[in-house]
């Protein structure tokens, strides 16, 4: 029974509140011409819990190998996190002939980052302050997603000129569709993650960023969508940039309660 208690004594368990951003990128994010669906915005609050455990005995960093005077402490650790978040992306657009378009995409996510961290303390006697850098994988699972789109297509002749009625008014056709899209695309995907963090006593603050190479395009939705491809922000953007990938990041404040 001594072993579980000794392990628990080294483990940090934190409750967290994060401001989480989900980016939906069409094309390559390094390309200045790529399209960011709905923009990153200010993110959404996300509740989570984190468990972090050191991997090995902490090693003193010395000034002189002969005197072994401790100047700092280096050690590795592994953190596993669990987050729930709900994201809304909304964007206004225009068709080739400047017809008005609107699209809204909602996503609910469960995310589980697994991060290896290098930690540094200023002194072997200093237990209150810790600086860390981490790299890892974020496992994401889409609980639910939905897409809503509306568009107005003004009627035009073969030359692209607007057609008017007998009273001289423009004529048009309105399109709209709304569906739960959870089962139309990939629900599970992985992202690469980077973290910079600082701990002070029970307080924990981190900044994380992640990106995924996985194409999240919902190809099977196209044949079941009532808005023409030419007037759909989602499909029109994909036809232009040829890839949809999810990225993002979060600013986290945590509190160690064990």
Image (spheres, rainbow, N blue to C red):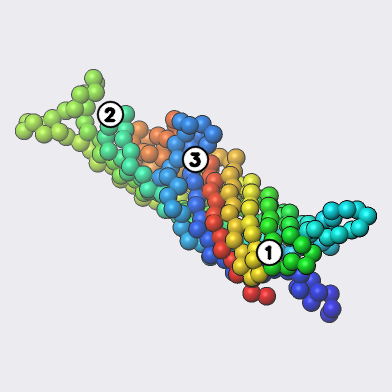
Query: Residue 113: image x %, image y %?
Result: 64, 56
Residue in front for this viewpoint, 66 or 138:
66
Which residue is situated farthest in the top direction here? 159
Note whether 156 is above or below 68 in the view shown. Answer: above
Left or right side of 229 for 183: right
Q: Which of 165 and 76 is in front in this view?
A: 76
Give the quadrant of residue 59. Answer: bottom right
* CB under 8 Å between discs 3 and 1: no
- Nearer-the-camera pick, 25 or 217: 25
Query: In the rendered image, which residue does mark 1 sit on?
Result: 129
Could you tell me residue 51's position as x and y percent?
68, 65
Q: Which of the two marks, 3 or 2, is nearer to us in this view?
A: 3
The residue at the point 46 percent across, 58 percent down is 44
Q: How far apart are marks 3 and 1 (CA)?
A: 37 Å
Vertical order, 250 against 238 (above or below): below
* Circle on res. 30: none
Classify residue 92 by image quadrant.
top left
Residue extending farthest to the left is 167
Separation of disc 2 and disc 1 at Cα?
A: 59 Å
Q: Residue 132 or 116: which is nearer the viewer?
A: 132
Q: Is mark 2 on a helix, strand or loop?
A: loop
Label 1 sits on a secondary structure element that is: strand
- Image depth: mark 3 or mark 1 in front: 1
- For disc 2, the marked residue is 97
Residue in view at x 25 percent, y 41 percent: 174
In the displayed orientation, state which residue is furthest to the right. Answer: 66
Write down the residue under mark 3: 25
């Amino acid at each position: 029974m001594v072993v579980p208690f000794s392990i628990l004594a080294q483990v940090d368990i934190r409750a967290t509140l994060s401001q989480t951003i989900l980016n939906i990128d069409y094309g390559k994010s390094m390309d200045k011409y790529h399209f960011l669906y709905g923009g990153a915005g200010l993110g959404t609050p996300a509740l989570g819990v984190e468990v972090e455990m050191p991997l090995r005995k902490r090693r003193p960093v010395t000034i002189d190998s002969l005197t072994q005077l401790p100047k700092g402490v280096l050690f590795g650790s592994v953190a596993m996190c669990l987050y729930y978040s709900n994201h809304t992306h909304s964007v206004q657009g225009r068709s080739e002939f400047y017809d008005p378009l609107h699209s809204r995409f909602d996503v609910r996510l469960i995310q589980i980052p697994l991060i290896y961290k290098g930690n540094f303390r200023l002194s072997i006697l200093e237990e209150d302050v810790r600086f860390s850098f981490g790299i890892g994988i974020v496992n994401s699972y889409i609980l639910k997603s939905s897409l809503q789109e509306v568009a107005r297509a003004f009627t035009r002749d073969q030359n692209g000129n607007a057609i008017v009625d007998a009273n001289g008014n423009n004529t048009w056709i309105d399109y709209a569709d709304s569906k739960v899209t959870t089962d139309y695309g990939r629900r599970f995907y992985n992202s690469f993650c980077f973290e910079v963090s600082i701990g002070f006593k029970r307080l924990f603050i981190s900044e994380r960023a992640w990106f995924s190479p996985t194409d999240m395009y919902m190809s099977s939705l196209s044949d079941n969508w009532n808005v023409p491809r030419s007037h759909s922000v989602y499909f029109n953007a994909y036809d232009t940039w040829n890839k949809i990938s999810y990225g993002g990041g979060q600013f986290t404040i945590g509190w160690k309660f064990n």
